[in-house]
Amino acid sequence: MRINFNRSINVRNIPLIQLTIVLIVCAIISLVLGIYKGIIGSVPVWLLGFSFLLIGGMVIVSGVVPQTVRAIRDLQEWQ
């Protein structure tokens, strides 16, 4: 029983940790774009596009979506 409880808690916490990392990267990118806009002026479209691609790549590489689905399934099993 205790082993299953620990596994269940770990399955639920992994997406939160991954999401935190993704959000930190998003915050850093937003900060850099804000500094760019404040110092240089308007942010070029290609830089915005690259930023969105970088964030999308980070979400895919981090595996946040599959881990979240796994956590939801685990919650449904316990109910």
Image: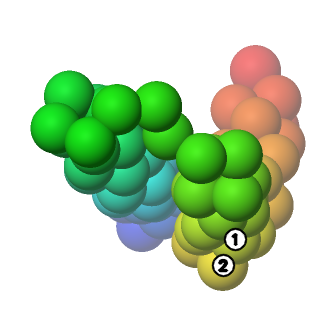
**Residue 67, above or below 48:** below
The answer to whether residue 13 shows anywhere in this view is no
For residue 17, side relative to residue 48 (left or right)? left
State which quadrant residue 75 falls in: top right
Residue at left 20%, top 28%? 38
Q: Residue 8: percent from the left, percent from the top?
A: 52, 52
CB of mark 1 within 8 Å of CB of mark 2? yes
Residue at left 70%, top 58%? 46
Residue at left 70%, top 71%? 57
Q: CA distance from mark 1 to mark 2?
A: 6 Å
Secondary element type, mark 1: helix
Mark 2 lies on residue:
61
Q: Residue 73: percent from the left, percent from the top?
A: 83, 42
Q: Which mark is on residue 75?
A: none
Q: Amino acid at mark 1?
A: Gly
For residue 68, side relative to residue 55 (left or right)? right
Residue at left 46%, top 31%? 42
**Residue 72, above or below 56:** above
**Badge 1 local density, few (<14 within 10 Å), some, or many (20+)?**
few
Residue in front for this viewpoint, 5 or 62: 62
Residue in front for this viewpoint, 25 or 18: 25
Q: Amino acid at mark 2?
A: Val
State which quadrant residue 54 falls in: bottom right
**Badge 2 local density, few (<14 within 10 Å), some, or many (20+)?**
few
Secondary element type, mark 2: helix
Q: Residue 66: percent from the left, percent from the top?
A: 79, 61
Q: Residue 53: percent from the left, percent from the top?
A: 72, 63
The answer to whether residue 36 shows anywhere in this view is yes
Q: In front of the other: label 1 or label 2?
A: 1
Mark 1 lies on residue:
57
